[in-house]
Amino acid sequence: MTDKNTINIYRNKALVNFEGKDFLGQIGVDSRIFQALNGGGISVGVISQQAIENGISVLVDENDASDAVDFLNKEFEKEKKIGHVSSIYSVENLSVIGFVSDNYNKILSELQRNKIYPLLLSQIASAGRVNIVVTGNQTEITKNIIETEIYGKPKTVHLALIGHGNVGGTLVEQILDSAYDILNRKRFDLKIVAIANSRKIAFNKAGFGSDWRQKIKYSTTESSVKSLVDFANEHHLENLVMVDNTASKDFVKNYPLFVENGFDIVGSNKIYNTLPISEYRSFRKLLEKNKKKYLYETNVGAGLPLIDTIKLLHLSGENITRIKGVFSGTLSYVFNNFSLRNDKFSTIINEALEKGYTEPDPREDLSGNDVARKLLILARELDLINEFEDINIQNLVPESLLSVSKEEFLSRLEELDDEYQKIKENQESGYVLRYVGDLHGDLQKEKGELDVKLISVPANSALGQLKGSDSIFEIYTESYGENPIVIMGAGAGAKVTARGVFGDILRLSETK
């Protein structure tokens, strides 16, 4: 019997299962089971006709499971011969967890979200008393989830961080700095239990502390998704979140495996959201099937609340007619400065490179591909089925410099100066240059028009007044007409991006 304020656990139990369609509903079956087992000195815990399809389950002690199967095979020998009973077998290494709760459905939902599906449940509605049967290796995680829901125990969220460079390393420090405050205010216990890069992975069931860099440095464990999944299973960790702060095209292929093994996903990696639309939609279906979430606010606009705003507008039925803006903090810095100063284009590029605003090879920014990926992500938030190949991209690198080495490109940067000086001088008076992404056309159809290009805009316009390396996004809707919703601010940088990823982790933790 379960105490009102206690979670009772009974280990080393077994289920003896009867299977047979015609067997159900026959009068006297329950009493024959009791008599056969009691006659053999075996105590029966629960009989349930809901535990397995077309069958009955009987709960017994694990030590009695083999004898129970023998006694029942003998008792129902006739029914087996004529096919009413197809098989009688035992499932061992089980635990019964008993508790009292008025909110059983919420507990069951949390268990299922952590991929725990009770093999048997017995509920006395009038008393709020519940007994559930789970596998032995799920006992602790089940107990933790029930304690969280019944007693308000802090919810432990186990984080696996992939990538610990600029963004990933900054995120680790932000989590460690805020963990105590979050535990007190939000009742979330954030534990970083795994940190990895492409070469090595380090584990700590209790959660990493300020010495995490030393632990990963001296780790001898080769990085692998299997070792991470095995670690989570071995230690029965609940509320799992995999955080991808890499830019790896290969690592995203593991997302479905993580979801199938009980992980939610948070990421600054843009790759998955720009894969072919068939893979994109298949992954969304997998998330839904497994009751998992994938949050990626930092995919566009770093820490700015852009994707969430677009999602809410779209979900509310608002007709978004156009999204336009400066998507790249790097190219924002380049053209904001080039438009206002008398310096050469190559001087500004070198300056941005020295400040760490560009990739080591600036052509990765100047190609426009990063802006194009961000624009495609927003298009897909509107349920458009555009592919990357549909985007019209103006590459800012001359064809003669596309295939040379990085070193040669940097040494020949001045070859860009004359062309961009002419573009600058041929503008109308009071205009400035901006490199923009523009999603337009009839966005109620299957596909929109996506353009990534260098344009000239009035210096006093919203786009024209952009400063530093800030990003700006204009969202045009049917309701707002010619007056767009404008979101502007720091759209790049490790601290800003890490803070955005941290925000996604907290938002996910609140829904767990």
Image (cartoon, helix red, strand yellow):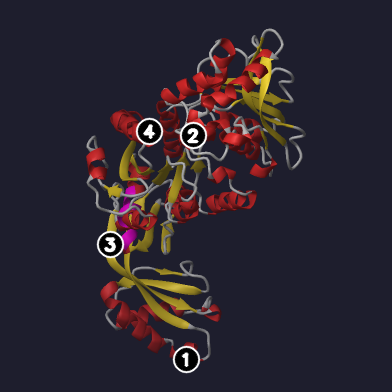
- Where is residue 398 drawn, in percent x and y? 62, 32
Give residue 89's position: percent from left, percent from top: 40, 79
Tell me which label, 1 or 2, sits earlier in the chain.
1
The amino acid type found where label 4 is placed reads Asn
Residue 379 point in image, percent of width and height: 65, 37
What residue sits right under mark 3 in the picture?
Answer: 10
- Tell me the magenta residue range: 137-144
- Vertical comparison of 300 with 17: above or below: above
* Crowd tier of the residue under label 2, counting other residues whose Cα lies within 10 Å: few below 14, some 14–19, many 20 or above: few
Name the residue tied to disc 1: 78
**In which quadrant of the rendered image does the N terminus lie?**
bottom left
SS at mark 1?
A: helix
- Badge 2 is on which residue? 408
Marks 1 and 2, Cα distance to the nearest angstrom?
A: 87 Å
Out of 333 and 46, give the one closest to the viewer. 333
The residues tagged by marks 3 and 2 sit, at their Cα atoms, a distance apart of 71 Å
Q: Nearer the viewer, mark 3 or mark 2?
A: 2
